Amino acid sequence: MKNLKEPLYYQDASTLAELIRNREISPVEVMKIHLDRIEALNSSINAIVTVAGGALEAAKAAETAVMRGDSIGPLHGVPFTVKDSIDTANVLTQRGSPIFRGRVPETDATSVARMKQAGGILLAKTNLPEFSYWIESDNLLSGRSNNPWDLTRTPGGSSGGESAAIAAGMSPLGIGTDLAISVRGPAAQTGIVSLKATHGRVPMTGIWPRAPRRFWHAGPMARSIRDLSLAFSVLSGPDGYDSFSSSAVQFDAGIAFTPYKTLRIGWLAEPGFGPVDCEVAATVEAAAEALKSLGIVVEPVRIPALERDFALDIFNRLHVMEMKPAFMEATAGQPDADIYKMAKTMLSLPDTSMKDFIEAEQAVERLRDGYAEYFTKYDALITPVLPIPAHKHGVTEFIINGETVDATYLQGATVPLNLTGLPGIAMRFGTSKEGLPIAVQIVGSWLAESTILHIASLLEMVSPVNGLHPNI
């Protein structure tokens, strides 16, 4: 087997797939290593809520296929994990709530089915907030997930269990969902990478909640940019069931790693996203300078549409009207003891007036127009993911650059992409004074995943944090 600098549980999915394909390692060995890692660490991190029955047997079947010389998929024998709001056939999918305790779907979500078709093996389900709704992964059914970098801090939400599992080496690759922050924020807080693609590129079939459908995304979370590219090539494309997933544009994983035309990139830390910590802003600028050192045209920019209409305010006025009915239906007739604070908060929020709703809809269109104008001049935009590194559990208010804001402000730089449907990648590029990951967000125009994956791969090559993992 090739000389690996890191343990197998910290190898990316692409490396594992190559080792399996070349018969340098058995899918059974890969599976056992990750199962052992879960057994050793999950009691303290609480990222995994259900280990899939039959994972080891599936690995044995994958090994047999390799030894027979069968034609195999790009993820053959590689374990993957899935957020527990995503349906998995014959495996518990409990959505972070006692209301759905014991729920076992009969069929896989489209995203899970596609990962299996590519040869991936479902390893486990990962923790989330109740109903996938909050910036921390905590619920009454499976408890709170902890950040592998510091157990007193959150790995984020709503795909926090997924991010923690990958960061800790319990999984090489996973699928999360994103309403306003939920694959990018957790990735930033735990030092991994994630992709929220253009809205509709990855079908949401078999994922709950669906409302508000126009803001929800599913996307890959991983340890390397090439893994994001590979997983996205597997996950993307219409499935005939999700009407938003109708783009016929095909994605080729190899495109992101081929020479590109001269790029023009802008970077922006403030204004438009709310207050941003100086360490985070410095990391965004450092990423911009790193790209500039590669001969790319990079310059600071402002986007007037973000300054005119604060995206977080727009989102708050829109999503309650569409998400609240789904929560009301799920909790109807259920005992109060089975409903956690996330759902109770949603149910207590006042309805948005029709006037405010319409005004917010028009503001979304102004944001889309503002980004459209920006992308006539630039190929990508570098921004923060979060305004601060991972925070302590249970904090509901932050002081950022002297300004006191509530916890929803963590979504200030991520939610514009949910409102507009633009694609974005979260990747680590720095470290805080406390030793915590700091990430940047690479934003592209609609359907321009190849461009931002290419830029992310360039940043990955010059990153000052390559090879850093939690000390656990």
Image: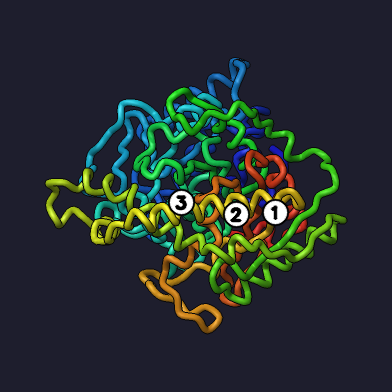
Q: Are marks 1 and 2 in contact (CB under 8 Å)?
A: no
- Secondary structure at badge 2 equals strand
Q: Are marks 2 and 3 in contact (CB under 8 Å)?
A: no
For mark 3, what is the residue? 361
Residue 276 badge: none
Dot 1: few (<14), some (14–19), or many (≥20) neighbours within 10 Å? many
Front of the two marks 1 and 2: 1
Indicate the position of residue 86 as horizontal and vertical percent values.
39, 38
Residue 426 badge: 2
| Circle 3: residue type | Glu
Q: On screen, 13 above or below 309? A: above
Residue 151 visible? The answer is no
- Look at 61% across and 44% down and name the residue there: 12
Indicate the position of residue 319 as horizontal and vertical percent values.
38, 52
For mark 1, what is the residue? 374
| Circle 2: residue type | Ala
In screen coordinates, is 386 left or right of 144? right
Indicate the position of residue 127 as horizontal and vertical percent values.
37, 50
Indicate the position of residue 261 as horizontal and vertical percent values.
84, 43
Q: On screen, 46 above or below 449? A: below
Question: 395 or 75: nearer the eye?
Answer: 395
**C-alpha separation, residue under disc 3 versus residue under disc 1:** 20 Å
Q: Earlier in the sequence, mark 1 or mark 2?
A: 1
